[in-house]
Amino acid sequence: MQVEQAGRPMQQRAVRTREVLLRAAAEVFDEVGYTRASITRIIDRAGLTAGAVYFHFKSKEGLAHAVIHEQARDLEFPEGEPGLQHLIDMTAYLAAEMQRNTLLRAGVRLAVEQNEVDLHEYAIYEWWAERFRRELVAARARDQLLPGVDEATFASLLVAAYTGTQIMSQLSTGRADLPARISAMWHCLLPALAPAHVLAHITVPDAEQPV
């Protein structure tokens, strides 16, 4: 029993240290990308020793993989009945989080840039597609989708459309106009997804672009 009690503080410290490293790495990757980030810069940002870093992560690549995989850990998606409206609300929430959530933003940046740095991390795209697919399956159960819509195919298309839209927003305005761009994306996609009588009861947030 004494050994277990002694081990708990050490485990808690290890968890806290890993968390500090993850957050520091996210900040650096978000600011400068994978190529320009360095272990030394991440160590300095975290205020830890090199030994602490290499205990948890064997390399900068290991840190990058962790940030990609854990990009959604801080998200608290809006509540609501699963279906088309909930899916739209989720994407609007993500647009706002991309403006303020460093871990999400860094994970997305790394996932987009990985072809340049040989990270080979496609699973996160599959994870997002599955999240969206579940909402579309629920929409199908509520008779909200057109007969020819394939839930898995549309979910993958939505991930691709969202990814491209946020890249364009980042290049154009530093993502300041991302909510407006996501709204415009939905106005284009919805007629191919749901019948008119369903769309009459769907709300797409019409965020105004900043002046």
Image (cartoon, helix red, strand yellow):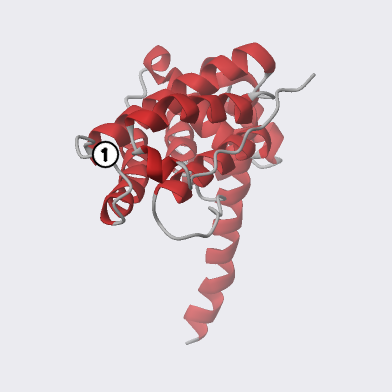
Q: Is residue 118 visible?
A: yes
Q: Residue furthest right?
A: 211
Numbered circles on residues, count:
1
Q: Residue furthest bottom?
A: 1
| Residue 163 drawn at (x, y percent) | 45, 25
Circle 1 sits in a helix, a strand or a loop, which is it?
Answer: loop
The structure residue drawn at horizontal position 49% and vertical position 45%, both measured from the top left corner, is 202
Tell which of 108 and 87 is nearer to you.
87
Q: Is residue 93 left or right of residue 139?
A: right
The structure residue drawn at horizontal position 55% and vertical position 50%, both measured from the top left corner, is 75
Work out whether 68 lies above or below 161. Answer: below
Determine which quarter of the picture holds residue 171.
top right
| Residue 85 drawn at (x, y percent) | 46, 48
The structure residue drawn at horizontal position 36% and vertical position 49%, both measured from the top left corner, is 135
Q: Is residue 121 visible?
A: no
Circle 1 Cα neighbour tier, 10 Å, few/some/many (<14 / 14–19 / ≥20) = some
Dividing the image into 4 quarters, which one contains the C terminus?
A: top right
Tell which of 188 and 67 is nearer to you.
188
Q: Amino acid at mark 1?
A: Leu
| Residue 194 drawn at (x, y percent) | 34, 38
Work out whether 193 lies above or below 143. Answer: above
Tell which of 114 and 140 is nearer to you.
140
Residue highlighted by disc 1: 146
Work out whether 9 lies above or below 117. Answer: below
The structure residue drawn at horizontal position 50% and vertical position 45%, both measured from the top left corner, is 90
| Residue 161 drawn at (x, y percent) | 41, 24
Determine which quarter of the picture holds residue 10.
bottom right
Determine which quarter of the picture holds residue 146.
top left
